[in-house]
Image (cartoon, rainbow, N blue to C red):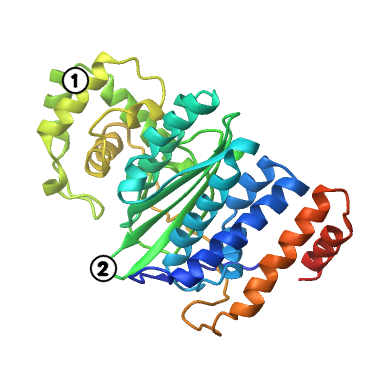
Amino acid sequence: MKTGYVDSPLHWGKAPRWLFSRMVKLSTVIVEAILTEFSRETLLERLSDPFWFQSLGNVLGFDWHSSGLSTVTAGAVKEAITKVSGEVKFFAAGGKGKAALKTPLVIKELGERFGFSSEPLIKASKISAKVDSSCIQDGYSIYHHTIFFTDEGKWTVVQQGLKESIRRARRYHWYSEKVIDMTEEPHSGIDGKKEKNVLNLTAKKSKKNKKGILEILKQNPDKFEKDMKKIIMPEYHWIRITDINLKNLKRISEKSYEKDLKNFEDVLEIRGTGPKALRALSLASAIIYGEKPSFEDPVVFSYAHGGKDGTPYPVDRKNYDRTIETIEKALKKAKIGNRDKIEALKKLNKLF
């Protein structure tokens, strides 16, 4: 079994227009081919597979060693899906920056337009983002979030974080059909460079620590404040006294006391439970209950290929266009009953 990590240096700028337009075209025929030959669930599962997603980016002509592969590939697939979404009830929302923040609104609008329940999908989008930004404290700030989903409520999330101090990025993948608990090892894969001193509240080893956090937040707010003042004296390598904001923690306690907290997912839905608050609460849980969280980085995987920047070779535009044309023709013939070419493509895929 081969293991390793994806080394994704931060590359600024945008994909050339000539390349991105082709990426959208090729993404469209690939999406249509998968939907024609298999199912919507197959497409979701493949997008949730870090190896497949990376390979897709390479096939589309992007560099294997660039942070842009994630964002540009997700953008191209999103545009491709938009072209067929109404027909097959398969959708995409999100993107970088402001586009990511509008994700809940876009999901809601699509739900109203196509007649499906949007609330569970909105929750999945928000919780997955919260988990990767607060429960896994690896030093990477989430700046890209895309969710792919069906009208039946099945979904895949692909999001990416960056660490400017080392100019590197890492990508997080989720698939609803593999998620049992969104706060316990929920990922279908995480790509990036292994880091030290990572607070990983999603690890199974952190289960008792999270249970302690839940119990602490069920306390009366006044008792909570008194206990926290006594507890937050020692400093750990993963949390400093300067990280702790007692006023914010008191507000969180007041909000949590009013709610019937049943699980750790409920904790994440409380406004204000960001990275610092969870670090402080995790420390308190470790001291009170003697159950430390995990500090193991959950990242895995590695692969190589190339494209846009000429690594390992420049994109061959003629062959690129020929590939799009070949798949488009095969799809057209498959739709009218001639499956010879689509079967040939499947054999070629196996050989590749």
Q: Residue at image x 38%, y 34%?
A: 104
Residue 150 at x, y percent in the picture: 59, 35
Residue 126 visible to the viewer? no
The secondary structure type at the circle numbered 2 is loop
In terms of depth relative to the viewer, which is nearer, 6 or 335?
A: 335
Crowding at label 1, few (<14), some or many (≥20) Cα neighbours within 10 Å?
some
Q: Quadrant of the C terminus?
A: bottom right
Q: Relative to residue 346, is residue 186 drawn left or right?
A: left
Residue 263 at x, y percent in the picture: 41, 25
Crowding at label 2, few (<14), some or many (≥20) Cα neighbours within 10 Å?
few
How far apart, in angstroms, are the residues tagged by discs 1 and 2? 36 Å
User: Between disc 1 and disc 2, whose residue precedes?
Assistant: 2
Residue 45 visible to the viewer? yes
Q: Quadrant of the N terminus?
A: bottom right
Nearer mark to the viewer, of 1 and 2: 2
In terms of depth relative to the viewer, which is nearer, 280 or 152?
A: 152
Above or below, 62 against 51 in this view is below
Q: Residue at image x 27%, y 66%?
A: 164
Q: Amino acid at mark 2?
A: Ser
Q: Relative to residue 268, is residue 19 drawn left or right?
A: right
Q: Residue at image x 86%, y 59%?
A: 343
The secondary structure type at the circle numbered 1 is helix
Residue 272 at x, y percent in the picture: 22, 33
Which residue is labeled 1 in the image?
Answer: 254
Q: Amino acid at mark 1?
A: Glu
Determine which of the numbered discs, if any, sits on residue 165 in the image. Answer: 2
Residue 241 at x, y percent in the picture: 13, 46
When asked about the image quadrant of residue 93, the answer is top left
